[in-house]
Amino acid sequence: MLKIREIQAIETYDLRLKVLKTSEKYIYKYQGDFDTETKHFGAFLNKDCIGIVSVMKNSLAAYSQKQIQLRGMAVTPKMQGKNVGKQLIQFIEKQYRQKGVSLIWCNAREYAVPFYKKLGFESIGDKFYIEHVCFHYKMIKNI
Ligand SMILES: CC(C)(COP(=O)(O)OP(=O)(O)OC[C@H]1O[C@@H](n2cnc3c(N)ncnc32)[C@H](O)[C@@H]1OP(=O)(O)O)[C@@H](O)C(=O)NCCC(=O)NCCS
């Protein structure tokens, strides 16, 4: 059975490198990883971490709600398409709704946009390029 729990920043590095690295210049240590407000979560099958997401307290200026940014969402290739990502997002929504957060957002890689849409996110604005990664869309969801 899948178990989701808080993990340390350094525990995300392995999957960030395995799943999210796009080039030698990909920065897998994010600014803010060790901020006191930042939290990291892992989805575990037995003892293996098969999915990760980080939550940072960054706000979009256009929205006044209490909000969080999702970063570094990744599921190990073998386990993709088996609802691990969905369960991670649902876990975050439940946790942060309880803390009064009503908006979650992320910079979604273009190819991951259908995943976020399926989970009720909508894209805002034009697509933009993040250096050494790919095109992204800003996506938001009211929770
Ligand atoms: C994107 C990612 C996190 C999604 O996690 P996942 O565990 O594979 O996705 P899930 O199985 O939970 O999918 C949830 C739903 O979205 C759908 N979905 C997932 N990826 C999709 C895609 N690319 N296109 C269309 N639908 C998609 C699934 O079919 C599922 O629908 P269902 O609830 O009707 O069955 C994962 O595939 C991944 O790590 N990809 C590579 C890295 C990446 O792109 N990270 C995101 C960076 S912004």
Image (spheres, rainbow, N blue to C red):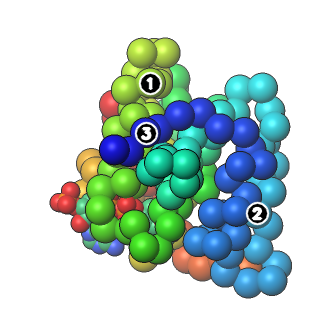
Q: Position of residue 102 (x, y in %)?
A: 41, 26
Please state which of the two labelled residues, at mark 1 or mark 3, is closer to the viewer.
3
**Is 38 rendered above or below residue 26?**
above
Helix, strand or loop at disc 2?
Answer: loop
- For residue 76, the mark is none
The quadrant the C terminus occupies is top left
Secondary structure state at the residue bearing disc 1: helix
Residue 63, horizontal then vertical, whole percent: 50, 33
Q: Which mark is residue 28?
A: 2
Left or right placement of residue 66 versus residue 13 in this view = left
Identify the amino acid type marked 3: Lys
Give the spatial CA distance, label 2 vs label 1: 25 Å
Q: CA distance from mark 1 to mark 3?
A: 14 Å
As shown in the figure, which amino acid type bears the numbered disc 2? Tyr
Residue placed farthest to the bottom in the image?
Answer: 23
Q: Which of pointers 3 and 2 indicates the residue nearer the eye?
A: 3
Q: Which residue is mark 3?
A: 3
Mark carried by residue 95: 1
Ligand 1: image quarter = bottom left
